[in-house]
Amino acid sequence: MNPYILAILLFGLGLGTTITFASSHWLLAWMGLEMNTLAIIPLMAQHHHPRAVEATTKYFLTQATAAAMLLFASVTNAWLSGQWDIQQMTHPLPTTIITLALALKIGLAPVHAWLPEVLQGLDLTVGLILSTWQKLAPFVLILQINPTNSTILIILGLTSTLIGGWGGLNQTQLRKILAYSSIAHLGWMILVLQFSPSLTLLTLLTYFVMTFSTFLVFKLNKATTINTLATSWTKAPILTSLTPLILLSLGGLPPLTGFMPKWLILQELAKQDLALTATVAALSALLSLYFYLRLSYAMTLTMSPNNLSGTTPWRLSSSQSTLPLAISTAMAICLLPLAPAATALLTP
């Protein structure tokens, strides 16, 4: 892609998200989300591959549906209450519709079905943008409206953690596994949103760091299926021995970074007398842990087939810069000791 066009598209992505961040008016927030969608579509379809075009079309249709729902709900809110302010959502009907529209935007279950399919059709770089940056603007809006209907958030959160765990069990494609991992993590964030918004933000940030690291590892190995991960020993042995730690951090095992948000969320849910919810969420984390362990096993404990198609990929050295990978890997593994500092910041 022409670097000037790429720069304009990335600028559009940044600007769309920033407009949504800065807006207090529903029309402006909607406009930011639309800019975001329109800027990523050429990036998704740049490889002119039938899978990429199909993924782009699916993404466009779901995002357009969510944006139409959002606009409809904000107009309804203006009609019922006479104001367009994001933080003044008083009527339950538009609040619920907007919550569902934003859930569709970020891919929460039960409106998640587009996310694995779309991510599967993209290359890893655009997939990374879709899994991290594209979640920011809708999340900020969910945080701002702070939905009063707690039942809908808990239902969305629990279904997402369960479907995110179950859906990934049967997959061999890495991008689909990462999509289900994304759904499960978003479920954890939504569960605790109404009780501690700052904890939701902390979870979002740790999820970003771990996902960024995982995508870069797969990109360095040029891996898209579980089988191709087995060649990584010969290509990058040190990275291969660190990758299981990143994956287990995504699964939320101590003493890794990913344990911190899960621990704090379960503690918060227990404080709010939601012991059953906390138990279901903790058990659903075991489902996710299974497929992270499966990836770790395939990567570190299996030998790749020694035929021509198996040995060719690791003979070609990667041109990818390894500094971002090194920094994000260190953060994904080593930040748990900062948990006391995080809790001190979280408590008002």
Image (spheres, rainbow, N blue to C red):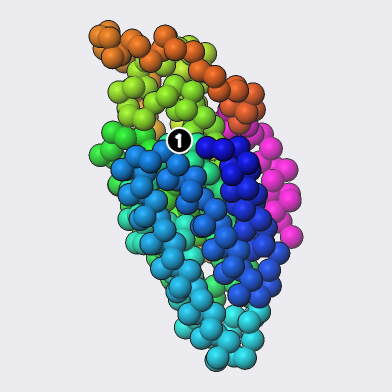
The image shows residue 327 at horizontal and vertical percentages of: 64, 28
The quadrant the C terminus occupies is bottom right
Most foreground residue, 265 or 111: 111
Compared to residue 89, the image places residue 176 above or below, namely above
Question: Is 346 within the magenta?
Answer: yes
Horizontal side, residue 144 vs residue 103: left or right: right
Q: Which residues are magenta?
A: 329-348
**Residue drawn at 58 percent across, 42 percent down:** 6
Q: Which residue is mark 1?
A: 124
**Residue drawn at 58 percent across, 32 percent down:** 332
Most foreground residue, 166 or 87: 87
Compared to residue 237, the image places residue 294 above or below, namely below
Question: Is 4 within the magenta?
Answer: no
**Residue drawn at 40 percent across, 65 percent down:** 155
- Residue 38 seen in render: yes
Locate residue 259: give its quadrant: top right
Amino acid identity at mark 1: Leu
- Residue 140 seen in render: no
**Residue drawn at 55 percent across, 91 percent down:** 79
The image shows residue 38 at horizontal and vertical percentages of: 52, 57
The image shows residue 159 at horizontal and vertical percentages of: 36, 59
